[in-house]
Image (cartoon, helix red, strand yellow):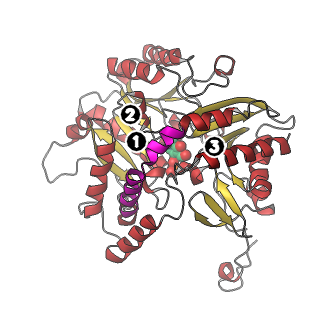
Amino acid sequence: MLDKSKPNSAVNVPNDLDAFWMPFTANRAFKRAPKMIAGAKDMHYFTTDGRKIIDAAAGMWCSNAGHGRPQISAAIAAQAEALDFSPPFQFGQPKAFELASRIADLAPEGLDHVFFCNSGSEAADTALKIAMAWQQIRGQGGRTRFIGRERGYHGVGFGGTAVGGIGNNRKMFGTLLNGVDHLPATYDRDKQAFSKGEPEYGAHFADALEGLVNLHGANTIAAVIVEPMAGSTGVLPPPKGYLQKLREITRKHGILLIFDEVITGFGRLGHSFAAERYGVTPDMITFAKGVTNGAVPMGGVIASSEIHDAFMSGPDYAIELFHGYTYSAHPLACAAGLATLDLYRDEKLFENAKALEPVFADAVMSLKSEPNVVDIRTLGLTAGIDLAPMADGPGKRGFEAMNSAFHDHDLMLRIAGDTLALTPPLILNADQIGEIVDKVGRVIRAIA
Ligand SMILES: Cc1ncc(COP(=O)(O)O)c(C=O)c1O
């Protein structure tokens, strides 16, 4: 417990780990053996005890241009000097408009309008609200249901949690949002194990949407939201043809399709957005993470002109959408975003991800015969490696792998239960792929 009788105890006791209740963390285990990070540069983190750790996670799928990029930090510093904050409601600042245009340029044809928020969670909730409001505006106010997907992740707001499909994230939070149903996950290990890229099997999982339409009636459903590649659940690439089918069925029934591209946006799959990779244009795309390289919080929704324009009616002094955040299009985030998009373009990082995809896939698949490996999936510069759970509890082997990687092998990776997720920065080269895979192999053997 903190000793609050002393003035400024938190300052006087900087190594007390008690006060910070860490998010999505095993707090007690962390505080017994902290994984503490003090600095970062390019492909590496530096620990407080001076070790150099290779980052196989791009932080949390966000630092696609690697760490400590001076172009980004200089842009943030200059912006803080010039304009630290201005209100985004009823006032504007130039970089917000510039960044929105740059993002719209990267998005598929027809997705032309960007609504800013501060995280992927806010982006998901914003997209759901826009969907419901749009249905009302076009005279379909009965369309209030949302369809998510089992194993989906759309952040931690009540809306995103409701459409999300990860049991642990939902089960303590009551009934969440009403009127939500879920498609089945797209994974079948027996039929898909050790697939590189999009599995051949599984397009038919999209047909379950017809079943939900029959169950609830199309005229009650506002939108379907899916990640093109489910990331946080442990990397589930979409089966070939699956997203195309979802698009056909949603269009047929007047249901909006939202792609949550918080992970897949900004180059992870070798394209600006997964929508481009698959040639499937949704009605809205949510983004966050990579838009600022993780340097300043930012998220947003890219909406089609059809959706946006429907709101632009009524008297022109009236607010069209009663939604927004104090920090929507924050000047520091916009400056970071513009500098980040410059780096992605100038260093051709999305192209690098695309070129390295087969090299990465082959390298990660070489771990197939390591102990306890029961499946490996790869897509873009992303891989999920499923390990068999330990007898004494699901998630323990993954947890031990993450700790062993950090403490004993100078490697940062992410876990989802017993799945190891590799999502390195897109500045990666072939040698670093080799180093990461070699270290992952050693970790897997160390915890066997
Ligand atoms: C697909 C997806 N949506 C939403 C989120 C939530 O983003 P945030 O943590 O910025 O709220 C995440 C985070 O990993 C995500 O992967």
Amino acid residing under circle 3: Leu
Q: Secondary structure at mark 1?
A: loop
Q: Is residue 342 magenta?
A: yes
Question: In the image, 117: left or right of 52?
Answer: left
Question: Distance of mark 2 from mark 1, alpha carbons?
Answer: 7 Å
Depth check: 173 or 150 in front? 150
Q: Which residue is mark 3?
A: 422
Q: Secondary structure at mark 3?
A: strand
Question: Distance of mark 2 from mark 3, alpha carbons?
Answer: 22 Å
Label 2 lies in ligand 1 vicinity (Cβ under 8 Å): no
> Which residue occupies 79% across, 56% down?
29
Q: Which residue is mark 1?
A: 272
Q: Are marks 3 and 1 in contact (CB under 8 Å)?
A: no
Question: In the image, 397: left or right of 375?
Answer: right
First in sequence, mark 3 or 1: give its number. 1
Q: Which residue is mark 2?
A: 276
The quadrant the N terminus occupies is bottom right
The tag on residue 233 is: none
Amino acid residing under circle 2: Glu
